[in-house]
Image (cartoon, rainbow, N blue to C red):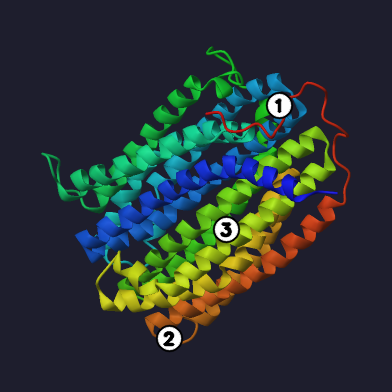
C-alpha cells in the first residue's frame, strides 16, 4: 500500500531529473524560436528559408537523439542493479555509435537540395534554404556526440551538465545570429545562411561544455571510464543500436510528419508556411516539458526495473503520468488564453498572424491527449519495448494522418488558412489513434514479470538526488 509520503518522495526524485531536462530542452527549442524570430525580422523570404530548412534537419537530429536514448535506458537499468562497470563500459561504445550517426546525418543534410527542388519554391528561397542547411550540417556530428553524453548522464539521473550546456548554447546563439545574419562587427551579412552558421557553432560549443562539466562532477566522474583509447565493440554497439533504432525511427517519423506537413503547407503560400512555423515553434516549447517529464519518468521506471521492485515501478509510473497531465493542462490554458500575444512576438504581418492563431488553438485542444501518448511511450521504452511505439507511429501518422492531410488539405480547394487548419486536424486524428494504442500496450506490459526480484544489498538507491 503506497502512501502520500511515497508519492511526495517520488515526485521530488522525478523533479530532480526533470527540471534540468525541461530547462535544457526548452533552451534547445528556444534556439529554433530565436532563429525564427530573428529571421522573420530580417525578411519574410529568410523566415521561409529557415522554416523549410529547419523542417528538414530537425528530423535528422531527432533520429540521432532517439538512437542515443537507448543509452539512457541501459544505463538506468544497470544503475538500478548496481552494475557500475557496465555503465562505464557503455559510454565509449555510445560515442562510437554517435560518430557513426554524425557521419550519416550530416551528408544527408548537406545534400538536401534534391528535395527542395521538388517543392516548387522560388529560386531565391530555395537557394537560401540550401545554404542554411549546408551550414547546419557541419554541426550535426557534434549534436550526436552531445546526445551520447547527455543520455549517459540521464541514465544516472544527473542532468545539470545538460541543462548548463544547453542554456549557454542558447544564449550564445543570439549574438552569433546577430553577427552573421545582420553582418555586424566586421562579419559578412549572410541572412538565413548566417543563422545556420550560428547554429553549427553552438552545437560544437555544447559538446565542449557538457563534456567538461561532466568530467568535473564527482557523482558523474565515478561512472566514467578511464580516458584512453577504446576500440569499437560490435556487440555493445549492436545492443544499443537494436534498442535505439526503433526509438530513432519513431522520433524521425513523428517529427517527420510535421516536417512533411510543413512542406505541404508551403505549397499554400509563404504566409501559410510562416504561420505553420510559428505554431510549430510554440508547440515545440509546450512539447519539450512534456517530453522532459516523460523521459525523467522513464529513468525512474528504469531504476525500479533494475532493482526488481514492482511497487517502485507503479509509483514512478503514476507520479509521472500525473506530472505530464498537469504540464499539459497548464500549456493548454496558456495557448488558449493568449494566442495573439504569442504570435505578436514573431511577426506583425496580419496575414501570417491570423493563420498562426488558428493553428495555435488547434494545438491547444489536443495537447492533453498527446501527453498521455508521450508518457505511455516513455514507459514502454523503460521496459525496452521500443518497436511497438515505432509501429504505432508508422501506422497512425504515416498510413492514416498524412494521406488524410494530403487528401483533405490539398485535394480540395481551400484558402491558406482553411487548408492549414484541415491539415492540422488530420494530424490530431493520428495522435488520438496513437494514444489509444500506446496506453493499451502499456497496460499489457505492466502485467508482465520484472527481470529481478529485489535490489541487491549495498546498491546505491535510485532515490539519490542530483548531486551535480
Which of the labelled discs sits on residue 54, or is there none?
A: none
Visible in this render: residue 230? yes
Label 1, secondary structure: give it: helix
Choose top left, top right, bottom left or bottom right for residue 305: top right
- Which residue does the image show at 89% across and 44% down from the upper left? 449
- Which residue does the image show at 60% across and 61% down from the upper left? 326
Q: Residue furthest bottom?
A: 413
Residue 20 horizontal side relative to residue 69, left or right: left
In x, y percent, where is residue 443?
81, 57
Q: Earlier in the sequence, mark 3 or mark 1?
A: 1
Badge 3 density bin: few <14, some 14–19, many ≥20, Cα 10 Å: many
Which residue is label 1 attached to? 235
Label 3, secondary structure: give it: helix
Q: Is residue 111 above or below residue 460?
A: below
Which residue is label 3 attached to? 254
Measured in 3D between alpha carbons, the distance from the residue under mark 3 to the one under mark 1, in whole angstroms, is: 29 Å
Which residue is label 2 attached to? 414
Q: Nearer the viewer, residue 416 or 407?
A: 416
Measured in 3D between alpha carbons, the distance from the residue under mark 2 to the one under mark 3, in whole angstroms, is: 26 Å
Q: Is residue 44 above or below residue 95?
A: below
In x, y percent, where is residue 270?
31, 71
- Which residue does the image show at 51% across and 71% down from the upper left? 364
Q: Residue furthest left?
A: 186
Visible in this render: residue 398? no
Q: Earlier in the sequence, mark 2 or mark 1?
A: 1
Q: Are marks 2 and 1 in contact (CB under 8 Å)?
A: no
Label 2, secondary structure: give it: loop
Badge 1 density bin: few <14, some 14–19, many ≥20, Cα 10 Å: few
Badge 2 density bin: few <14, some 14–19, many ≥20, Cα 10 Å: some
Amino acid at each position: 500500500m503506497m502512501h502520500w509520503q511515497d508519492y511526495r518522495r517520488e515526485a521530488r526524485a522525478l523533479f530532480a531529473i526533470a527540471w534540468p531536462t525541461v530547462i535544457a530542452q526548452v533552451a534547445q527549442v528556444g534556439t529554433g524560436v530565436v532563429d525564427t524570430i530573428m529571421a522573420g525580422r530580417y525578411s519574410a523570404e529568410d523566415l521561409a528559408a529557415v522554416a523549410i530548412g529547419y523542417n528538414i534537419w530537425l528530423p535528422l537530429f531527432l533520429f540521432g537523439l532517439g538512437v542515443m536514448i537507448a543509452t539512457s535506458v541501459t544505463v538506468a537499468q544497470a544503475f538500478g542493479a548496481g552494475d557500475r562497470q557496465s555503465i562505464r563500459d557503455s559510454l565509449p561504445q555510445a560515442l562510437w555509435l554517435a560518430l557513426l550517426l554524425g557521419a550519416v546525418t550530416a551528408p544527408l543534410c548537406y545534400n538536401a537540395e534534391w528535395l527542395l527542388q521538388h517543392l516548387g519554391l522560388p529560386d531565391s528561397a530555395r537557394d537560401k534554404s540550401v545554404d542554411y542547411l549546408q551550414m547546419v550540417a557541419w554541426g550535426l556530428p557534434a549534436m550526436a556526440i552531445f546526445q551520447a553524453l547527455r543520455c549517459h548522464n540521464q541514465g544516472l539521473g544527473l542532468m545539470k551538465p545538460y541543462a548548463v550546456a544547453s542554456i549557454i548554447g542558447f544564449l550564445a546563439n543570439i549574438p552569433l545570429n546577430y553577427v552573421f545574419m545582420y553582418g555586424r562587427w566586421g562579419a559578412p551579412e549572410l541572412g538565413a545562411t548566417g543563422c545556420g552558421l550560428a547554429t553549427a557553432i553552438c552545437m560544437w560549443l555544447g559538446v565542449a561544455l557538457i563534456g567538461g562539466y561532466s568530467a568535473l562532477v564527482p557523482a558523474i566522474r565515478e561512472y566514467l571510464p578511464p580516458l584512453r583509447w577504446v576500440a569499437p565493440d560490435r556487440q555493445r554497439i549492436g545492443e544499443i543500436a537494436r534498442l535505439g533504432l526503433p526509438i530513432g525511427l519513431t522520433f524521425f517519423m513523428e517529427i517527420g510528419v510535421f516536417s512533411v506537413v510543413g512542406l505541404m503547407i508551403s505549397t499554400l503560400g509563404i504566409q501559410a508556411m510562416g504561420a505553420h512555423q510559428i505554431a510549430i515553434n510554440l508547440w515545440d516549447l509546450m512539447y519539450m516539458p512534456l517530453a522532459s517529464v516523460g523521459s525523467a519518468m522513464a529513468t525512474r521506471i528504469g531504476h525500479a526495473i533494475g532493482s526488481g521492485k514492482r511497487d517502485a515501478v507503479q509509483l514512478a509510473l503514476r507520479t509521472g503520468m500525473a506530472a505530464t497531465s498537469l504540464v499539459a493542462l497548464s500549456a493548454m490554458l496558456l495557448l488558449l488564453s493568449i494566442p495573439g500575444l504569442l504570435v505578436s512576438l514573431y511577426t506583425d504581418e496580419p496575414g501570417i498572424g491570423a493563420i498562426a492563431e488558428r493553428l495555435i488553438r488547434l494545438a491547444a485542444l489536443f495537447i492533453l491527449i498527446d501527453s498521455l501518448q508521450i508518457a505511455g511511450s516513455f514507459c514502454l521504452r523503460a521496459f525496452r519495448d521500443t518497436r511497438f511505439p515505432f509501429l504505432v507511429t508508422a501506422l497512425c501518422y504515416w498510413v492514416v494522418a498524412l494521406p488524410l492531410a494530403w487528401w483533405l488539405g490539398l485535394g480540395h480547394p481551400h484558402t491558406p488558412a482553411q487548408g492549414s487548419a484541415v491539415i492540422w486536424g488530420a494530424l490530431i486524428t493520428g495522435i488520438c489513434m496513437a494514444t489509444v494504442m500506446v496506453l493499451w500496450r502499456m497496460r499489457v506490459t505492466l502485467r508482465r514479470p520484472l527481470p529481478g526480484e529485489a535490489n541487491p544489498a549495498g546498491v546505491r538507491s535510485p532515490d539519490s538526488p542530483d548531486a551535480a
